[in-house]
């Protein structure tokens, strides 16, 4: 399905218009090659200062998915999906690795100035505040992920209805990590609801 969709070269308009949440999936293994190609696109998401705080945890193990479903209050799409992505933000990891985010084309002096400025800015924030800042950036990558999945022929459903502390325990994640979403995905085995959205005059204001 992914190969077919790629060959069709759908436009971004096609992908956005066709994407909708699905909660029942075909029981088949998703090739790791497809997942890698999807994340090759997602990692191009923009972020302020290029800090890229997003981290993705892909779960395909049946037992782990069952634990995630339990943490998601029994929502069956979690185990119906062949794979589940936990979209997280880890600003503490970013802070430990500022040099990795600075553009290699900058002069050494400019690099060191950039690192010093970032260290001063985020070092003056609490762990919670910089975690929330990183989450706003990670939500950009979440949007890229949903459209990229659609582009490779996979349906998905972004979720926030789960016990975040239990999921951290299941995956061995640090307390400071923030969640943007849990995203079960695979080939659709049922139709989702058609789009029901506000009209433009509700959400767009011209000034």
Image: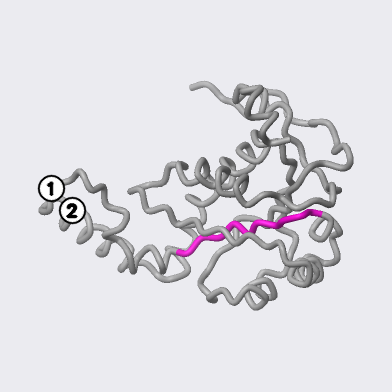
Q: Nearer the viewer, residue 59 or 55?
A: 59
Mark 1 to mark 2: distance in Å? Answer: 6 Å
Residue at the extreme left: 109
Does residue 172 appear to the left or right of 156 in the view shown? left
Rendered position, 18 above or below 149: above
Disc 1 crowd, CA 10 A, few/some/many (<14, 14-19, 20+) = few
Secondary structure under the numbered disc 1 in the rendered image: loop
Per the rendered image, the range of residues in magenta is 81-90
170 part of magenta stretch:
no
Check residue 148 in the rendering and tell me which mark sits there, or answer none.
Answer: none
Decide if residue 100 is on the left or right side of residue 174: left
- Is residue 199 shown above or below 24? above
Question: Relative to 202, is 127 above or below?
Answer: below
| Residue 143 on image: x %, y % | 59, 42
Image quadrant containing the N terminus: top right
* Residue 85 belongs to the span the image colors magenta: yes
Q: Residue at x 77, y 42 (%)?
A: 21
The image quarter containing residue 84 is bottom right
Do the residues bearing badges 1 and 2 touch, measured as CB atoms within 8 Å? Answer: yes
Task: Give residue 107's mark.
Answer: 1
Whole-percent x, y for residue 181 in the image: 65, 55
Can you give x and y, in whole percent of width and height, for residue 180 in the image?
Answer: 60, 56
Residue 129 falls in which quadrant of the image?
Answer: bottom left
Q: Taken as a whole, is the magenta stretch helix, strand or loop?
A: strand
Query: Residue 15: x and y, percent?
Result: 66, 28
Left or right position of 75 against 204: right
Pick the residue in front: 125 or 42.
42
């Amino acid at each position: 399905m992914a190969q077919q969709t790629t060959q069709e070269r759908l436009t971004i308009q096609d992908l956005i218009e066709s994407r909708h949440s699905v909660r029942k999936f075909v029981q088949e293994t998703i090739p790791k090659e497809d997942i890698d190609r999807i994340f090759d696109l997602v990692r191009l998401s923009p972020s302020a200062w290029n800090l890229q705080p997003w981290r993705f945890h892909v779960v395909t193990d049946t037992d782990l998915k069952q634990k995630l479903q339990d943490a998601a209050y029994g929502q069956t799409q979690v185990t119906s999906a062949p794979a589940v992505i936990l979209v997280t933000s880890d600003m503490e990891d970013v802070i430990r690795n500022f040099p990795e985010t600075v553009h290699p084309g900058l002069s050494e002096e400019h690099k060191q100035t950039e690192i010093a400025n970032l260290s001063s800015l985020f070092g003056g924030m609490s762990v919670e505040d910089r975690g929330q800042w990183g989450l706003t950036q990670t939500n950009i990558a979440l949007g890229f992920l949903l459209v990229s999945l659609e582009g490779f022929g996979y349906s998905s459903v972004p979720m926030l209805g789960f016990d975040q502390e239990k999921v951290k325990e299941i995956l061995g994640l640090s307390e400071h990590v923030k969640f943007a979403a849990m995203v079960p995905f695979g080939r659709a085995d049922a139709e989702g609801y058609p789009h029901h959205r506000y009209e433009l005059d509700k959400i767009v204001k011209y000034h």
